[in-house]
Amino acid sequence: MNITISKYISTFLAVGLLLIFAGCGDTDYNSGMYWLNKEKNPAMAARSFQRSLAKRPGHWKTNIMALKALAQSDNAPEYEKQLRSTLQRWPDSTRSEAIYRSGVSLLGEEKYDRLSAPIAQRHFENLLGKKGDRPEIFCNIVMASCRMKDTVAATDYFRRLLGSLEGGNAPDSVTQELGFLIGPAGVEWVQLDWKVSKNPDDIDMRLAQLNAGLIVGDSASTRAKLAELAARLPGAVSDPEIVRRFGRLVGVDPFAAKIIAKGWDGSYSRDGKQIVYIRDRGKSGEPDQYIYTATCSGGRAAPIMKGLQQSLPSLAWPLLSPDGRYVYFYGSPNRDWSPDRSIGRFHLYRVRTRYGSRPQRLTDAELLPAKPHFESDGSMLVVKRDVCSTRASVEVARLVPDKRELTTVSRIGEPVSGSTFTPNGDSLIFTTDRGIFRRSVNGGNITVDLARRGLFFPQISPDGKWLLVLNRQNQALLIKRSSGDIYFIGRTAKVSGGFNTNGRLLLSQVLQGQYHLVELNLSREIKSTDEFQAAVR
């Protein structure tokens, strides 16, 4: 009993002395500081700070300490209520370290932004009405809109920011934040849109804008910009190369596409006379995948392997060996597995080209889906993943199929979303969030292959001139590596494509509800541009 009384007396005296030495008349604030710092009791501290705020709601430090105490006591409902109250008084302080740190620690960054960013956006919009089109205000609104994930507002205010800068560059912090929301190509698309409005007769700038639109995957807007080009500079759309680049965007086919088989993930044999692909023969919605081969001259298609018989319901990316004896492919016992998603485990198999042969699994390590490169000594180059994700850092490895030996050759220590070996096998071209890069398979410096971001699953042509890639809308694009020009191919049902040495390309498309392999003649001559000119006007 005496001990308990003595403890309370000591606490009372300590609080009293704290108040005297603090020289502050707000006993509730000082009591809160005591409970927070001396007694390590944030719940009691929060109550004291809130009592203080009832008397002095506009005291900055008390607001901050109340938020800190509520965060430490894990009282999310009261914290959110106090956060709204504090930010209504100081709406430009959403990124203040004093507020931001406690908010993110309790709520997480996404929820904190969802609560705080709308308040900041309204504040800066009101400020814009009072002070006019000032760049620093536009910057703040763009940043707040990005945190809200309000794409329309962020893009619109970014355009207005560019106008207020009168040709100057937007701050890197703003373009980076907007890039997180709409992608770097989306930022470039908006920037070029503004530049074209100031230089409407600059054809190079207009073509750069169309390239950016294709990367973003905004087909409707790109078609509209193409129509603007035709109206402003009619001679531009009479160029056969423009027809090749944008014909399929407006319903004109410069590549004479034709269906050659039912299925997907097609690839050519080395001599270009045969194809291998996946076909689903399942009924009533139950998948039943096979590997098929067929001659390009129109011969009868023949099955090589039934996946379910080998406990491999999911098959992908079949590829004939140079000697035609084996088909190499990726497979998985997981029905939901697909190379374009980070689901399941990616292992490489091979099977002989006669029906009934049993497949051999060649790797225990998980691989990034990429077409292997066959070496002259019988070995293969493959891309090995570090973790179970299509966006992992990777290792280039050499596989000896007959011995199932996998040896690491070099490593790329950053997330890679897709890769392809150059035709001679000396380099790996790969995509990351930063762009399209190239590196020797033996290591060394990483160089920029193409200054394009927002593209995935690169696949190179046998002559090394073309790169097939996908944008975020699953639209296939061809990039001419010598110039960086982009050619629109169209929506694809699967990420895999196949080139042959005669300038032809295989793609997977869904037509009338079924997967089909479509062959495009990339070297077809354009004899007339009349149809294209009519389509873009």
Image (spheres, rainbow, N blue to C red):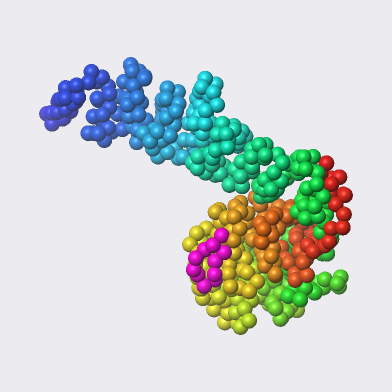
In this rendering, the answer to whether 290 lies above or below 135 is: below
Coordinates of residue 416 in the picture (x, y in percent): 55, 59
Residue span colored magenta = 438-448
Using the rendered image of the protein, determine whether residue 375 is visible from the camera's viewpoint: yes
- Which residue is at 72% across, 41% downward? 201
Viewer-closest of 202 and 44? 202
Choose top left, top right, bottom left or bottom right for residue 75.
top left
Using the rendered image of the protein, determine whether residue 314 is visible from the camera's viewpoint: no
Coordinates of residue 206 in the picture (x, y in percent): 70, 45
- Which residue is at 52% across, 44% downward? 176
In this image, 361 relative to 20: left or right? right
Placement of the N terminus among the 4 image quadrants: top left
- Which residue is at 70% across, 39% downward? 200
Coordinates of residue 214 in the picture (x, y in percent): 69, 49
Choose top left, top right, bottom left or bottom right for residue 5.
top left
In this image, 85 relative to 336: left or right? left
Coordinates of residue 3 in the picture (x, y in percent): 13, 31
